[in-house]
């Protein structure tokens, strides 16, 4: 059975054969491992070239070795790193030697979980680290690094300190009613609650920008059959993903292409042409196409020069209308296409730079913010919404005892975000998302 008191190890570098591979070790036996495999511990926090030996005294490899005694380490425990040559044979034999010394392989996210449990980072910062490891684009990297460095955590801690002060004042008024405490104390509590509530509501009204950037956006391409949707998808992805055919109804399933636009990862969905049909398979494709409207952050509505887009599309707050096939003779861009925002030929590239600029601008508008560090996960938003609801009740409370209870509930809801209270049920789900060695 795993325990945070065990000494664990894992390969922290990439999979496959590499020039150098890093094995991380954390736990109380880290120093013992170095004494056995290196014949002595190297100086703390200095890279030392050492020969590694197995239990039988056979040489395994020459490696750079780091000794990182706790609590000044990533996990807060005694730690070590072995920078070995990255062949499978070296990694296999070094891992076997570590196992022979009583170590076990770390579980996904176990190093970061130990750092959290030992107070080296908060839960929000740990999630920022996970996002940094998974980041695909520069914008995602910046957001994750900001969270790892404590940007969002400082905002939450500030709210928690304010709530703690308000709760202490409110409790004092309840516990010492005969002490003639100044009336200004209760007035201060009642005045500060709305200010705090407005700050939280401002965060909740950010249109999910942080979550959208972290997860990536979804842009759905919709239109009538043979409008040029699949050709557009291939042009955006710069490779052949969808089959292009003059036969209407060729696309049945939803096809995906993930590309970067303005530093934001965007998944484009190519959908079946929307029309009435008696073909059961094509009808299912049309149903799925219409369902993408509910999950899409933006619609790219495609129409040919000779046929406007279907008139039965549900409304969406963000739409870019594109006329395709501009290279064909006799193309009509007249009265039936007054709402079009781009005219392109995906075959020749005409208008594509302008369309990409529009799409990039839309992606940035949906995600990027110059304001305070954003919420990045649904659990942050749910807990903060709960805290705001508790504060709203506290603002309306007529009795001091009810106001104190609502303040206490709001503080507890914030604590679930930062990991200070009530997080045992979510720790496993968070840390299992990490890779081995992190």
Image: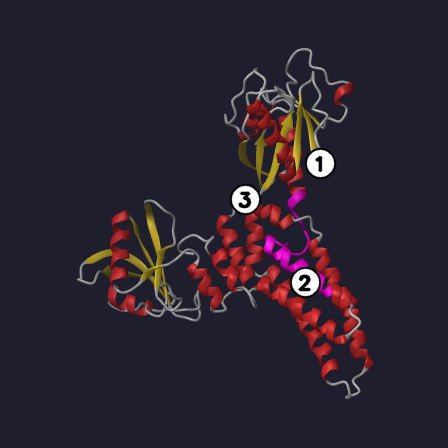
Quarter the N terminus occupies: bottom left
Residues marked 1 and 2 touching at CB (< 8 Å): no
| Residue occupying image coordinates x 61% and y 59% | 152
Answer above or below: position of 327 versus 320. Answer: above
Secondary structure of the residue carrying tag 3 is: loop
| Residue occupying image coordinates x 33% and y 67% | 30
Q: Which one is nearer the viewer's eye here, 333 or 188?
A: 188
Callout 1: few (<14), some (14-19), or many (20+) C-alpha neighbours within 10 Å?
few
Secondary structure of the residue carrying tag 2 is: helix
Instruction: Identify the disc placed on residue 387.
Output: 2
What's the distance in space between the residues labelled 3 and 1, CA to CA?
Answer: 27 Å
Q: Is residue 51 visible?
A: no
Instruction: Identify the disc placed on residue 137.
Output: 3
Callout 3: few (<14), some (14-19), or many (20+) C-alpha neighbours within 10 Å?
some
Instruction: Identify the disc placed on residue 316.
Output: 1
* Nearer to us: label 3 or label 1: 1
| Residue occupying image coordinates x 72% and y 15% | 332
| Residue occupying image coordinates x 63% and y 59% | 383
Secondary structure of the residue carrying tag 1 is: loop
- Among the two numbered marks 3 and 2 on one chain, the one whose residue lies closer to the N terminus: 3
Callout 2: few (<14), some (14-19), or many (20+) C-alpha neighbours within 10 Å?
many
Give the magenta-colored segment's residue range.
366-391
Answer above or below: position of 63 versus 228. Answer: below
* Residue 94: percent from left, percent from top: 26, 56
* Residue 74: percent from left, percent from top: 44, 64
Q: Residue 61 falls in which quadrant of the image?
A: bottom left
């Amino acid at each position: 059975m795993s325990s945070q008191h065990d000494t664990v190890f894992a390969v922290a570098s990439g999979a496959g054969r590499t020039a150098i591979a890093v094995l991380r070790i954390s736990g109380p036996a880290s120093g013992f491992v170095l004494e056995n495999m290196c014949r002595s511990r190297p100086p703390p926090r200095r890279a030392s070239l050492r020969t590694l030996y197995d239990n039988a005294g056979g040489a395994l490899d020459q490696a750079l070795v780091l000794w990182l005694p706790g609590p000044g380490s990533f996990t807060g425990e005694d730690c070590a790193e072995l920078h070995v040559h990255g062949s499978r044979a070296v990694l296999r034999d070094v891992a076997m030697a570590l196992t022979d010394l009583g170590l076990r392989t770390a579980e996904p996210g176990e190093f970061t979980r130990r750092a959290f449990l030992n107070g080296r980072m908060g839960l929000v910062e740990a999630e920022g680290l996970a996002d940094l490891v998974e980041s695909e684009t520069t914008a995602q990297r910046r957001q994750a690094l900001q969270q790892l460095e404590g940007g969002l955590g400082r905002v939450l801690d500030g709210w928690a300190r304010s709530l703690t002060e308000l709760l202490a004042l409110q409790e004092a008024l309840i516990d010492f009613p005969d002490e003639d405490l100044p009336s200004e104390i209760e007035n201060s509590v009642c005045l500060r609650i709305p200010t705090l509530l407005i700050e939280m509501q401002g965060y909740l009204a950010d249109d999910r920008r942080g979550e959208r950037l972290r997860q990536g956006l979804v842009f759905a391409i919709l239109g009538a059959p043979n409008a040029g949707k699949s050709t557009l998808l291939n042009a955006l992805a710069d490779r052949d993903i969808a089959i292009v055919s003059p036969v209407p109804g060729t696309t049945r399933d939803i096809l995906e292409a993930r590309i970067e636009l303005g530093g934001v990862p965007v998944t484009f969905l190519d959908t079946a042409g929307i029309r009435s049909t008696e073909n059961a398979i094509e009808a299912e494709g049309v149903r799925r196409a219409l369902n993408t409207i509910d999950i899409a952050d933006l619609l790219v509505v495609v129409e040919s020069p000779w046929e406007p887009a279907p008139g039965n599309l549900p409304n969406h707050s963000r739409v870019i209308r594109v006329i395709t096939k501009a290279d064909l003779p006799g193309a009509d861009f007249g009265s039936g296409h007054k709402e079009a925002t781009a005219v392109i030929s995906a075959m020749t590239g005409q208008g594509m730079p302008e369309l990409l600029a529009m799409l990039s601008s839309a992606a940035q508008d949906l995600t990027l913010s110059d304001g305070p560090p954003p919420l990045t996960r649904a659990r942050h938003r749910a807990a903060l919404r709960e805290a705001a609801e508790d504060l709203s009740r506290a603002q309306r409370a007529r009795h001091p005892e009810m106001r104190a209870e609502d303040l206490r509930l709001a503080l507890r809801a914030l604590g679930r975000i930062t990991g200070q209270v009530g997080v045992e049920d979510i720790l496993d789900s968070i840390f299992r998302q990490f890779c081995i060695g992190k």
